[in-house]
Amino acid sequence: MAKEKPPTANPTNAAASSPTPSDPKPQAGYSRPLSAERTAEPPGSSGRDAEAPEPPVSSGPDRPGPDLGLVKTILYYGPERQHFEELLDGLSQVPSCLVVGQASPPYVVYRNTHMRFVVDHDPQETRHRLRDGYYNLVLVDLRNRGEDQERARAQVERVMGLLDAMAREKDVEARYGFHRVVALVGGPSSEREDQLLLDLGARGVGRVVRNFVAAERLGGGAEPASRSSHCQHFLDVLLATMARRQPGKRALCAAGGGITAAYFELGALKCLADCLGPDTLSTFDMYFGISAGAVVSAMLANGFAIDEIMAAIAGHEGPRLPPITLSLLRLEHLNYMDYVRRAESAAHDLWQWLGRLVRGKARFSLDGLVMGHADFLAPPFVGNAFERKVRGIFNLEGATNDFRLLDRKLFVGATDQDSRTPVLFGDEGWDDVPISLAVQASMSINPAIRATKIRDRFYEDGAVTRTSLFLQAINKGADLVVVLNPFVPYVSKEPGFAEKRGILYNVDQDIRALTYTRFESTRDLVLHHYPQVSSYTFLPANRLRRLMAVNPMDHRPYLPIWRGAYLSTLQRIEQLRYRMAGDAATHGLTLDTSPAEAIAARLRATAAPKFADFFVDGKVELRLPAASSIRQPAPTEAAAAALGWPPAELAGPVGA
């Protein structure tokens, strides 16, 4: 919490912009009201640190002119109307400050900034406003106007109750950032003010303006110059708190959870692309992936569009990617060589044991026979063939299998199988590992897929040590983080539902519950620590989780999973639309859900969606990202062999 002190010397007032000729600026008091055209609140963004898109200011006899600059909206909470009126009265004494108190909403113009105040005196109403709209700043008034002690104490309790209720917001991504909260403290009792400072600091309030003088009755009749100095300092604090920030980096963080998780992420990203623009997902600054999310993130970092990835899975021939199958039940994916090695070792041990048994040096024990040879069991699959396919895709011209050659940063999380420590491929010291090999390591989840050997060590699924890499994204400068986490458990309302299922289902659900609990608690702590970061997490709806939990390695239900992912993502976007719009604007993006709404209407109307249903007009139209080459280059012989394509079939213009 930054404790603000009033200036010790009279500051030099910066001249405010001149009003229009029809709106002469008064030296004190209030001017005429704003017209109704200026009362609507701007669309918003994250309460943490984002800018609302600023509406144009038109000139006219009842409106401020275009030279009045930036438009900001402040949510004011004070115990009584008199507090706010005295606040405006004090601000009217500041030179070069225009105060319009009779407008709806009232506004103040200072230093080329147009500050509109939405005034509340009911904590519940204030909370409702925070859930429904965007505010550049929340101002809480804790000044003591000379009320009796009991009344003043009750007013403080109401304000503290409001702050506590804001802090208890269950959806941490909808929580208003307390670094954007300013508190006014003042009154005859310095001891009371000291306690308020402690209480506000404990709650993480961003700034406190103390000994604020807004009227003669406060502070025992202050001199006009002192009042003006205090009020100008207060306005400067507001402007500093609402100052436009330079946008940081944009990051996409995709978690794991098997083949069905990759399907969910593709459906969610399709919805995001339809809302933010088709090329947006290929222009993030950083991509982070674990397991299935590593596959998706690596494809995006290499410039592949979501539409063409989905088309390949759906068996639709695309301009760059052929149809792809993710089925594991193929000979190339079976870990038979590992079983041959383990069988030879087990046979050798068994032969030695039989020799000792014949010589009377060993006793027969079923427990010893079974428990002593548990190492014979090994993961049934190996990721080598999948790595070759990924390598072939990334060896196409326009893509790369080298972290260091990517235009945008890619990071893949894995776990050292022996030390049980996380590794971030693509980071310094790990960027020389081929991307395809890093992806193979990240998705090598026991007990399904064998660990991957890199630099004489073995690596397995990154989810063993980290559920998501959002903290790593923040540490690398991201302030807008999109998180996809399909690795969540299914919550059944039917007692005994899980007990009726097999051991594999329950092991999978237990792991999901552990990893999601870890993710949720870590995310909440991180976002409280970094209130300036805007994070949006997309999870599968519970009904979709049931489908995804049947078998996370099932490659067949991609269409219903895409459908559920698309609809649940749009629902989340609509829930936080007033925040996302501002965050998008801060990063030069536009949030427009109308294309997604049209697609969602088609998806809701069918029980058996087709791939074409994921396009606005119901017709599959694949396009390459803007950064892609206009011609489809032929891959190298090695890349074509890995993909199973004859090189001649891959040459020619896009769409040919």
Image (cartoon, helix red, strand yellow):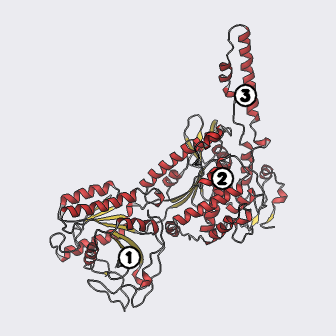
Residue 342, disc = 3
| Residue beneath the point at 44% across and 50% down | 525
Decide which of tag 3 and tag 1 comes sooner along the chain.
1
Q: Position of residue 376 (x, y in %)?
A: 70, 28
- Residue 466 is at least partly visible in this image: no
View extreme (front): residue: 495
Q: Residues within 10 Å of mark 3 (few under 14, many from 20)?
A: some
Q: Is residue 580 visible?
A: yes
- State the image coordinates of residue 261 (x, y, percent, origin top left): 64, 51
Instruction: Identify which amino acid the numbered label 2 is placed on.
Output: Ala
Q: Is residue 114 above or below residue 458?
A: below
Q: Nearer the viewer, residue 131 or 645?
A: 131
Residue picked out by circle 2:
262
SS class of the residue under badge 2?
helix
Kind of residue at badge 1: Arg
* Quadrant holding the N terminus: bottom left
Image: 369 above or below 311? above
Contact, mark 3 vs mark 1 (Cβ under 8 Å): no
Residue 455 — which label?
none
Front in this rendered view, residue 458 or 361: 361
Q: Amino acid at mark 3?
A: Arg
The residue drawn where x is 76% and y is 39% is: 334
Residue 656 at x, y percent in the picture: 81, 67
The answer to whether residue 73 is left or right of residue 194 is right
Task: Judge whether 58 appears above or below 518 on screen.
Answer: below
Front position among marks 3 and 2:
2
Disc 2 to disc 1, C-alpha distance: 45 Å
Measured in 3D between alpha carbons, the distance from the residue under mark 3 to the one under mark 1, in whole angstroms, is 73 Å
The residue that label 1 is drawn on is 116
Q: Position of residue 603 (x, y in %)?
A: 68, 64
In the image, residue 469 sits, relative to residue 192, either above or below, namely above
Left or right of 608, for residue 97: left
